[in-house]
């Protein structure tokens, strides 16, 4: 019920997760997650609210570190490197370096209250970028399919853009520091259908260079854009809380066409959730 | 036909029950609206009228003796020769030093408490105490300043000096600045911090580039409100022994001094009416200094907001 059913070769996995448990305080939020995210593909996490899909996503770049009560057990390997090492290695491990290699796009577009140019340049600058900044800004904005819309107003505030443009600006900001993986936490939840479509088209271009993990509530979106889909569910615990777990993880066609689990079939066919 | 009559009857029945269940009483609700609107207008009018009367009274009695020689003369026993120069310069010195001390210490403490410290019992203990300190009467700070800066540290502060006065007023307004800084930092959306961390920034990079600039207008407002409070304080400075008669200009932070409110207080407490008019002139000068300070802050703030 929990296993990664297709078991791709380890070498093709950008991120591999083994027996992941995440706690908030003493509450177990997600349990026993095993999965491999293949390189240069799009993996989608779907499931009802509170099933822990965002929690798992936020482990990949250790954003859960910002929540004081969060605690992670198990192993997550990024390109073979244990990102939750224990003991002496834990002190030497630096999540700041990890986050340059694993970028993130958030649910609500959150450009910095600075100029469009500065939104892109800042991340590169703090990471010690030594190249031509103008060129990097243009390349990143082109990469996020927003260059033509903003090239004449790079000095204007990023907040002056529309919601969809802001989100593409955030994607441009993420790819400017040349990460290997981009995590997207419901990137289209606050956008209209046309902006959503643009972001989805962008994602299929981006996967040539990047590995993408996307959390989405929109099942059509998962089936449209992703190569592999993980379905999470939540079950009630004895203590009266909820704990999330991975129900099934497989190629997207299998999850939406012929899933092995009854729960998955019910969820993707809209019978619950 | 029957069908229609049935639906009509039902609609009528619905209407009747709806009327019985809901009694909108629009007239009564609008009356309440009007009453509260009138009450708030009355409150505003009272506040503004009292203030306007005060200003008018001060202007009326003060404007006569307000001339260039008032600003450039030292205090004197003869009202026609008395001026406010030493108090004006003293206030300038003290406020400059208060700003220099209180801004970095207050904003720094606020930053630590809000951005760096864990949310444990110790942080909460400090938080409660700082909020309480903001409400402590200013004369208590005067006593503290007297003990700490005049008696214990007198060798370094020069006793009843500008430095002592500035340090005492700094203590007085630090809690206000800390609380204002924390409020301003708390108002910065977490999404901005997360965006910074997700790009591989560490705490200081996020704070310096994003959190602090976003919160800065709010912090500046708090600092200026605090300085405005400090500029009008008399009690703590009298307690530490700031002199009222200074017929010379202080040359450094270790010299004795007086400030505008002390000079005003001194003139008001004299029996002659001429001195009362001088006090009114002093109040006008104090108000102008305050207004200049506040407009400078508003200017800085709007510049900062535009820059983003």
Image: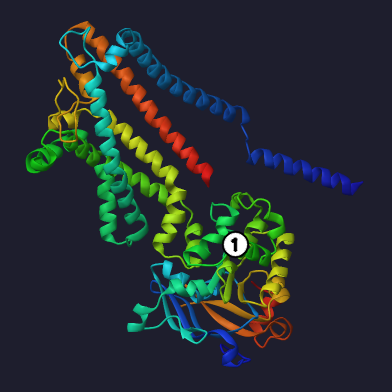
Which residue: 29% across, 41% down?
A: B100
Q: Quick check: B166 left or right of A242?
A: left
Which residue: 71% across, 55% down?
A: A149
> Which quadrant does the N terminus of chain A fall into?
bottom right
Q: Quick check: A235 left or right of A90?
A: right
Among the 4 quarters of the image, the one containing residue B150:
top left
Among the 4 quarters of the image, the one containing residue A109:
bottom right
Q: How many marks?
A: 1
Q: Nearer the viewer, residue A234 or A167?
A: A167
Chain letter of disc 1? A
Where is residue B260? Give x, y as percent: 25, 23
Where is residue B43? Give x, y as percent: 44, 23
Which residue: 27% across, 17% down?
A: B72
Where is residue B95? Give x, y as percent: 28, 33
Q: Which of A25 and B38 is in front in this view?
A: A25
Q: Mark 1 points at which residue?
A: A170
> Which quadrant does the C terminus of chain A fall into?
bottom right
**Res B47 visible:** yes
Q: Which of B256 and B194 is in front in this view?
A: B256
Scheme of colours in the image: rainbow
Q: Which of A51 and A113 is in front in this view?
A: A113
Whether B8 is drawn above or below A261: the answer is above
Q: Residue furthest right?
A: B1
Whether A267 is drawn above or below B52: the answer is below
Q: Quick check: B247 left or right of B210?
A: left
Q: Quick check: B49 left or right of B31?
A: left
Where is residue A74? Give x, y as percent: 44, 84
């Amino acid at each position: 019920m929990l296993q990664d059913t297709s078991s791709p070769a380890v070498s093709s996995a950008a991120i591999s997760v083994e027996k992941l448990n995440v706690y908030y305080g003493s509450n177990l939020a997600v349990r026993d997650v095993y999965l491999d995210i293949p390189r240069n593909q799009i993996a989608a996490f779907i499931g009802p609210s509170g099933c822990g899909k965002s929690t798992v996503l936020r482990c990949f770049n250790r954003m859960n570190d910002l929540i004081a009560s969060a605690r992670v057990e198990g192993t997550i390997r990024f390109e073979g490197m244990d990102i939750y090492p224990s003991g002496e290695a834990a002190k030497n491990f630096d999540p700041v370096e990890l986050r340059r290699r694993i970028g993130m796009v958030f649910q609500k577009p959150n450009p910095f209250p600075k100029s469009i140019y500065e939104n892109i340049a800042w991340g590169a600058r703090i990471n010690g970028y030594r190249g031509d900044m103008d060129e990097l800004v243009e390349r990143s904005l082109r990469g996020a399919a927003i260059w033509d819309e903003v090239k004449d107003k790079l000095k204007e505030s990023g907040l002056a853009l529309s919601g969809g443009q802001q989100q593409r600006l955030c994607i441009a900001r993420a790819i400017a520091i040349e990460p290997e993986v981009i995590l997207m936490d419901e990137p289209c939840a606050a956008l209209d259908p046309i902006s959503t479509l643009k972001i989805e088209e962008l994602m299929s271009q981006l996967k040539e260079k990047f590995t993408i993990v996307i959390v989405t509530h929109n099942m059509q979106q998962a089936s449209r854009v992703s190569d592999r889909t993980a379905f999470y569910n939540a079950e009630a615990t004895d203590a009266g809380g909820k704990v999330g777990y991975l129900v099934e993880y497989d190629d997207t066609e299998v999850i939406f066409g012929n899933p092995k689990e009854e729960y998955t079939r019910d969820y993707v066919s809209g019978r619950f959730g | 036909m029957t069908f229609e009559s049935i639906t009509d009857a039902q609609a009528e029945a619905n209407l009747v029950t709806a009327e019985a269940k809901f009694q909108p009483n629009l007239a009564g609700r609008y009356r309440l609206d009007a009453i509260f609107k009138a009450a708030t207008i009355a409150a505003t009018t009272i506040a503004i009228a009292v203030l306007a009367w005060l200003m008018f009274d001060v202007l009326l009695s003060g404007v006569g003796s307000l001339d260039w020689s008032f600003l450039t003369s030292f205090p004197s026993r003869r009202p026609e020769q008395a001026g406010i120069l030493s108090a004006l310069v003293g206030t300038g010195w003290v406020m400059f030093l208060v700003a220099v001390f209180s801004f970095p210490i207050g904003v720094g403490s606020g930053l630590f408490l809000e951005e760096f410290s864990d949310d444990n019992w110790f942080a909460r203990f400090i938080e409660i105490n700082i909020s309480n300190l903001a409400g402590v009467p200013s004369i208590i700070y005067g006593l503290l300043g007297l003990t700490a800066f005049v008696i214990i540290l007198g060798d370094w502060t020069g006793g009843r000096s500008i430095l002592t006065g500035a340090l005492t007023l700094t203590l007085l307004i630090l809690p206000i600045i800390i609380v204002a800084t924390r409020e301003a930092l708390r108002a910065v959306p977490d999404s901005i911090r997360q965006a910074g961390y997700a790009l591989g920034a560490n705490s200081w990079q996020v704070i310096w580039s994003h959190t602090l600039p976003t919160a800065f207008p709010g912090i500046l407002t708090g600092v200026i409100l605090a300085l405005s409070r400090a500029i009008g304080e008399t009690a703590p400075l009298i307690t530490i022994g700031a002199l009222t008669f200074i017929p010379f200009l202080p040359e450094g932070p270790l010299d004795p001094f007086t400030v505008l409110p002390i000079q005003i207080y001194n003139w008001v407490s004299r029996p002659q009416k001429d001195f009362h008019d001088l006090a009114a002139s002093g109040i006008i000068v104090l108000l102008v200094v305050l207004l200049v300070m506040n407009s400078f802050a508003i200017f800085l703030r709007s510049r900062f907001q535009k820059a983003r």
